[in-house]
Amino acid sequence: MGKRRRVAQRRSIRPAVIGSVIAAVVLGGGVGAYALYGGGAVAGQASAGAEGREKAVKTGPLSEAEVTGAARRFLTAWQRGRPAEAAAATTDAAAARTLLAGYAKDAHLEHVTLTPGVRQGDKVPFTVRATVHHGTVRKPLTYGSALTVVRGEGDGEPLVRWASAVVHPDLKDGDRLVTGEAGTPPVKALDREGGELTTKKYPSLAPVLDGLREKYGETAGGTAGVELRVVRGAASQKAELSDKTLLELSEGTPGTVRTTLSPALQAEAERQVAARKRASVVLLRPSTGEILAVANSSPGFNTAFQGSLAPGSTMKVITSSMLFEKKLAAADKAHPCPKFFTYGGWKFQNDDKFEIKGGTFKASFARSCNTAFISQAPKLKDADLTQQAQEVFGLGMDNWAVGVPTFDGSVPVQSQAQMAASLIGQGGVRMNPLNMASVSATIQSGTFRQPYLVSPEVDGRTLATASRTLSAGTLAQVREVMAYTAAYGTAAEAMAGVTGNVGAKTGSAEVDGQKKPNGWFTAYRGDLAAAGVVQAGGHGGSTAGPIVAALLKAAG
């Protein structure tokens, strides 16, 4: 840094009006001051005869001078490194002072230059240029932001409406800017063939790669880099927003972690979900539990692994296995499918109020008859479905060790109408595509094998297990009704052309406040199992079905 030059005294000549532009005058040493131009006096200037008189509360629309004056006070103080003074020019001095003080102390930002743009009503955009430093490393930072001027409570004086996003647009209230060593060293994730997995090739893997770094960064042999990042506060964490890197000052040395993902199938999964909004899919190998592909059309959150959604009628795979075991149904025996069935004070019905007279359970399963399942609720105990999901399918015990964060399904013990609704995947039941792909995999192989993205041999972790398997007779019946559904039922259109040993189940889950239901689909083909969901998409056969079927076909 050079020596600071003396600042010339401001001349008393009134500046010319140049519309509503605020001009930044940058002084020596990187410190700037603001000259605000506009019609009328700058807000805060007292007229000669105003001294001593009680100040009236200001109301009405803000003038150009008030907006530019408030912006000048705030931006000038911030740029000069006076957080308390800048905070006093906002509507929340305490919160503003904390964040602005951390701008230099925690984020290590210096030589800040703020350049306002053209005023837009009560809003003033501005550009931030600064230097981020950490030890001997320095890098320039440039970004845009904006502030809005409002009347303060009480006196009506113009103030900057405080929000953390004023300091940086990626900040939510409660977040901080921090420069330092990254929390964990970077990780180079590899596919099963040794190729590198990047978000450039596979955009939806962003949360998966973040999860791998969090899990294996400290043990994969890498070293941490230095970065400026947004550290999320409690509110952002509750909204499931993760820390965000804004500027990398120095690269870390990545460690290496090999995954089970297939590059070809991952690419196909990415293509499939990209064609629909809010779609997610998972493909795995039932004989081992290896996850071969995972993709989400909204890459900000890994719905495929961490979603918690009602699975609708795909849950009937689990329910059917329970009914077969309890001798409450048999694939080829007659089974009731009335238009309506009332239980626990709720009146349940089928889609379009259809009924099947004299039909078999297999026909009810294939057409996804809700009342065929609800009608058995009076014969069940409240905990029966929960026990079936846990003991046979390994769900709902929060003990999966996939290699990245997952939600392992939830089938809570419920009673009356809620218990009945759980039988058809509503009520309190919550799943995601990983869970439902595992359900199909369990039926295909006959044994629950916990899905995994990173081999347990990498870190010696213990995979979850189920306490029992289905009997040969029960397993055969579940496979029979799933095969029939794939060939002749609601899954037939999507599964057309998917040959070999196949089985499928569709699902639609109603969501409060949502016009269309979430569409679900789960299926298997040979030693492959997959499941997908399209949120607010409609019926599963026409939304998630084609995505799942395309992956099963692509796998050969």
Image (tube, grey):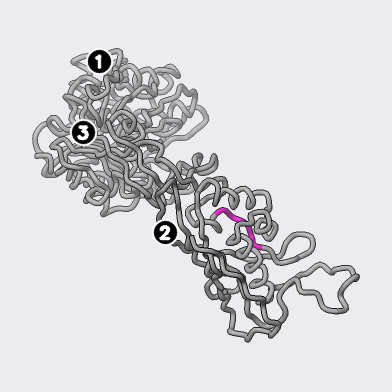
Label of residue 258 in the image = 3
Q: CA distance from mark 1 to mark 2?
A: 60 Å
The numbered mark, 1 or 2, whose residue comes first in the sequence reads 2
Q: How far across and how far down the image is residue 494, in percent?
A: 19, 45
Residue 432 sits in quarter: top left
Query: Which-is-in-front pick, marks 3 and 2?
Result: 2
Q: CA distance from mark 3 to mark 2?
A: 35 Å
Mark 2 residue type: Pro
Where does label 1 land, which residue? Answer: 469
- Left or right, 138 with respect to 44, comes to left
- Left or right, 320 with respect to 96, comes to left
Contact between marks 1 and 2 (CB within 8 A): the answer is no
Query: Which-is-in-front pick, marks 1 and 2?
Result: 2
How many numbered tags mark residues here?
3
Residue under the point 49% across and 43% down: 232
Where does label 2 land, which residue? Answer: 140
Q: Quadrant of the C terminus?
A: top left
Boundaries of the magenta span = 160-164
Residue under the point 70% across and 57% down: 88
